[in-house]
Image (cartoon, rainbow, N blue to C red):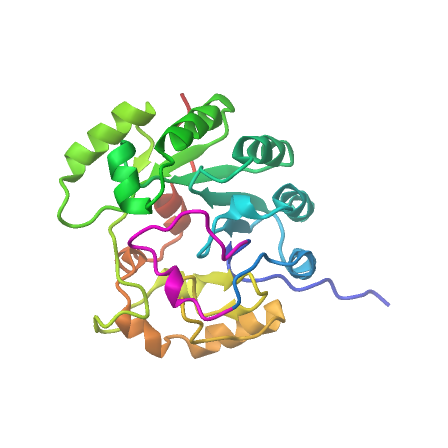
Amino acid sequence: MKMESQKKLSEIIIDLELSSLCNLSCTFCPRSKIKRSKHFIDLNTIDSLIPIIDEKHIIWFSGMGEPFLHPNLPEIIRRIKKSGAKVYTNTNASAPRYKDTLDIAIKEGLDYVNISIYGHDNESYKTNTRKNVFDRVLDNVKFLQNLKVPYRISYVASSEVNKNELRKKLEDVFGTDKIRLPQLHHRSFSSREQSISECALAQFYLFISSDGNVFSCVNDVSGENNFGKDIYTAAGEKRKEYPFKICVYCDEPHRTIPYKEDYFQRVFDLSSRQK
C-alpha cells in the first residue's frame, strides 16, 4: 500500500526564534514584556519542523533575540537545508564570534542576511543600544559584504527623523544603498487601539518561539495566543482563530501591504542587488 506523504505547512514564511536572549539592550525593544522562558530553541523543535517544510518555504530566524548567540546555529541551518527550504536570518552583527559563525553558516547554505542597525556612529549606537559596539558592528558588516551573500541593512526609524538624511548617512557609513527604513511601530501589547484590518504577518506567517510553541505572530510578545508545540496542528488552529484580540493594539507596517501573489518579493526584496 502506498503511504501518504507528509503534509506541508501552507505558510510560506516561518519566523523561527532561535534565541530569546540578546547581547544588546535597545531602548525601543519590548523584550522586557516577554513572559515565556528566555533561552535557545531546542534541536528537537528543528527536527519536528523539517518534515513539514520543503523548497517553497523560507525559514526566517527572527523573534525577540539575537540568532547568532545560538551555539548550534550552523547545525540548525544544515538540518533545515536538507528540506530544500531557504534560510534567512536577522542579526545585530555584534554577537561574540559573529565572524566565525557567519562564515560557517554561509558554508552550510545561509541564503540571506538582514542586518538590524541602530545608529551611524558611536554616539547614536550608545544612545539606542546602551552598548559601545559601533566599531564592532561596522567591522562585521564589512566582513559580511566581502562574503558576497545577499543582504540588506534595516534601521527602524521614528516618525520624527528625516529619512532622506538618515539614508544618506547610513549609505556613507556602511558603503551600500541596500538600506531599508521600516517605521517604528507599536506591537500587539501597546495601548493604541485601532480596527482590525487584513494583516499578512498574522495570517500568512507562522511564528515558532524559542520554547518551541507556536504563537499568533512575532509581535505577540507577551505570549497571549499559545497554540502549542505540535507545529502542524498549531498552524491549523492559528488559521482558524485569526483575527486575534491583540491585533487591535498593533500598527505593524505589514498591514499596509496588500497580500498579493508578489507579496513576499515586495516585502523582503528577495532579488537584492549585488555589487
Left or right of 149 on screen, residue 232: right
| Image coordinates for residue 265, horizontal then vertical, percent | 40, 44
Q: Is 175 situated above or below 56?
A: above
Residue found at x 43% / y 61%:
218
Residue 67 is one of the magenta-drawn residues: no
Point out the stretch of residues depicted in magenta: 19-36
Is 21 one of the magenta-colored residues? Answer: yes
The answer to which of 139 and 197 lies nearer the viewer is 139
Tell whether 81 sits left or right of 121.
right
Numbered disc total: 0
Residue at x-position 73% and y-position 62%: 5
Report the predominant secondary structure element of the magenta stretch.
Answer: loop
Q: Nearer the viewer, residue 194 or 57?
A: 194
Residue depicted at x 58% and y 62% = 9
- Determine the residue located farthest toward the right in the rendered image: 1
User: Which quarter shows the C terminus?
Assistant: top left
Residue 252: percent from left, percent from top: 29, 60
Is residue 71 positioned above or below 253 on the image? above
- Relative image position of residue 47 (x, y in whole percent): 70, 57
Asked if residue 88 can be seen in this view, the reply is yes
Q: Position of residue 13 (x, y in %)?
A: 49, 54
Residue at the spot 86% in from the left edge and 68% down from the top edge: 1
**Can you tell which quarter of the image residue 155 is in?**
top left
Image-based side of 100 in relation to 34, left or right: right
